[in-house]
Image: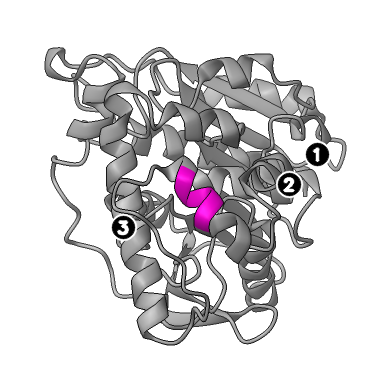
Amino acid sequence: MGNHFSPEAWHKLFEERRPKPLSAPWWARGGHRQTILSHFLRKVDDLPRCTPESVQLDGSDQLAIRYYPGTTDTIVYLFHGLGGSADADYMSRATLVAGKRGFHVFSVNHRGCGEGAGLAREPYHSGRGEDLAAVIAHGRRKFPKARHLAVGFSLSGNALLLLLSGKRGVTKPDGAVAVNAPIALQTAAVAIKSGFNRVYDLRFVLRLRRSVRQRQAAGLEPEPYQIPPWATLHDFDNLYTAPAGGFSDREDYYHSCSTKDLLVHIQTPTVLMSSVDDPIVRWHDYAEAQRSASVYLHREQVGGHMGYLSANDTPYGSKFWLDYALDQYLVALNEGLRIRS
């Protein structure tokens, strides 16, 4: 196939590697149970040693990242979701998944997250495609002849798609996976403040409000932003994310950074993964969006928002179906890129 590895060839490869459908256990049926219960299962405590590194952004801001060495010529970049860090359980599990294949891993903390607290004046948000590009540029300088794959979880999935579309950021990966990405930010922000979803909303805003206070106490945030304790994420985006991120208001932020209408511009082989019962990200947004031939859409009937708990052990010996799915698609991307080169 050489350098003429067509979108059709990619789709065939993805179909061949497509993970078997998820069968949910009786105790985790429904999007809310999948979303919540996945946080209470076994935590990862056997990660290999990593080397802390930093990536310089525009201005004085830096990102704190972790480098896990591998044995192959494939690099995997992992980007966490809202309110998370490189310590998030799904990030640790993905690190192990990639590491077992011999892939090098860069596990990334967004601005001000994890060990990056105090290293950035500007906040992170779902439109920071340029930050992801800076990390990938860092990896390409370190491994110029390698294959570079990126995985974005939730909020980072949207930022990754923004980069891939060419709207924000320059240096792209060679292949990508976006998991439960909120490609229509306005819709997701409204959904998360409605009904039972308010539970997730309160959790996110609690973490974000704490982060703002810490930034203010450290002198990194000169503006006296006041976030009421009852604020929703929708409120938070108007009170803080938009003005601190350089947007006129939340509508400008949502419009500028949503990727639903940009998927048609993506030329990098990309897998979009989501579930019909995700309580935060509407499946209809994916179904309605026009996509380029380079974008492969994977739909699961169950899984919630990054839950994906399985009734049976996956081929990798756990109930975390997402780990199995990520492994399959990372292998497919790596195989395709190897053939293409």
Query: CA–CA distance between discs 1 and 2?
Result: 7 Å
Mark 3 packing: few (<14 Cα in 10 Å), some, or many (20+)? few
Q: Are marks 1 and 2 in contact (CB under 8 Å)?
A: yes
Tell me which secondary structure the magenta stretch mostly adopts: helix
Q: Amino acid at mark 2?
A: Leu
- Tag 2 residue: 164
Mark nearest the camera among 2 and 3 is: 3
SS class of the residue under badge 1?
loop
- Tag 1 residue: 267
Q: Amino acid at mark 1?
A: Gln
Please state the extent of the stretch shown in magenta in the rendering: 235-239
Using the rendered view, name the quadrant where residue 333 is placed: top right
What residue lies at 22% left-to-right and 14% top-to-bottom? 29
Q: Is residue 90 visible?
A: no
Pinpoint residue 217: horizontal percent, then vertical percent: 35, 83
Pinpoint residue 306: horizontal percent, then vertical percent: 36, 34
- Tag 3 residue: 207
